[in-house]
Each structure stands twice: as C-alpha cells, then as structure tokens.
Amino acid sequence: MKPMHKRNKRVDEHKNKWALMHGIPIIRFWEKDIRENPKKVMDELKKRLYMESTKIALAEKKNKRHVNKFHKLK
C-alpha cells in the first residue's frame, strides 16, 4: 500500500469514528460508480434517506405522550 493510500485509510477511520460518535451515517460510493452509473447511486441514496426518515418518524411517534381519550371527556 502506498503512503497516500495509508493516509487516506487513516483519515477515513477518523471520519468513521467521529460520525459514529455524533450519530451521523456515512455512505460511501466509488467515484467510478458516480460517473458511470449515477442513477444507481441516486437510487441507493433515496433508499437510505427513506430508511432514515422512517426511523426518525417512528422514534418521534414512540416518544409522543399517550393521551387517554376517556380523560378528555371529564
């Protein structure tokens, strides 16, 4: 492995740790895939974003306080 590859690997490891500590997902794509098959990359991004937004919506719904309907009638 060349020195530049080693450095890039270390930098990526630091980015991974930092993102994990802050709850930020990292999605990586090869530059070749971005250039040669952008539709595939966009489809994957949309799929991941949908999954994340669904998780967030479920968590928000779970954290909402339950209101007893019968309490409101009194």
Image: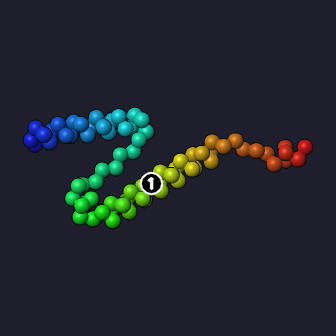
Q: Residue at x 57, y 50 (%)?
A: 57
**Residue 6: quarter of image:** top left
Residue farthest along the left direction in this orientation: 2
How was this image coloured?
A: rainbow
**Residue 62: quarter of image:** top right
Q: Secondary structure at mark 1?
A: helix
**Residue 63: quarter of image:** top right
Q: Position of residue 24 (x, y in %)?
A: 41, 41
Residue 3 higher or lower than 27, as above or below: above
Q: Position of residue 10 (x, y in %)?
A: 21, 36
Q: Residue at x 44, y 54 (%)?
A: 49
Q: Residue at x 28, y 34 (%)?
A: 14
Residue 18 higher or lower than 38, as above or below: above
How many marks the image carries: the answer is 1
Q: Residue at x 20, y 40 (%)?
A: 9
Q: Quadrant of the N terminus?
A: top left
Q: Amino acid at mark 1?
A: Leu
Q: Quadrant of the C terminus?
A: top right
Q: Position of residue 5 (x, y in %)?
A: 14, 42
Label 1 crowd (10 A; few <14 / some 14-19 / many >=20): few
Q: Position of residue 21 (x, y in %)?
A: 40, 34
Residue 43 higher or lower than 67, as above or below: below
Q: Which residue is mark 1?
A: 49
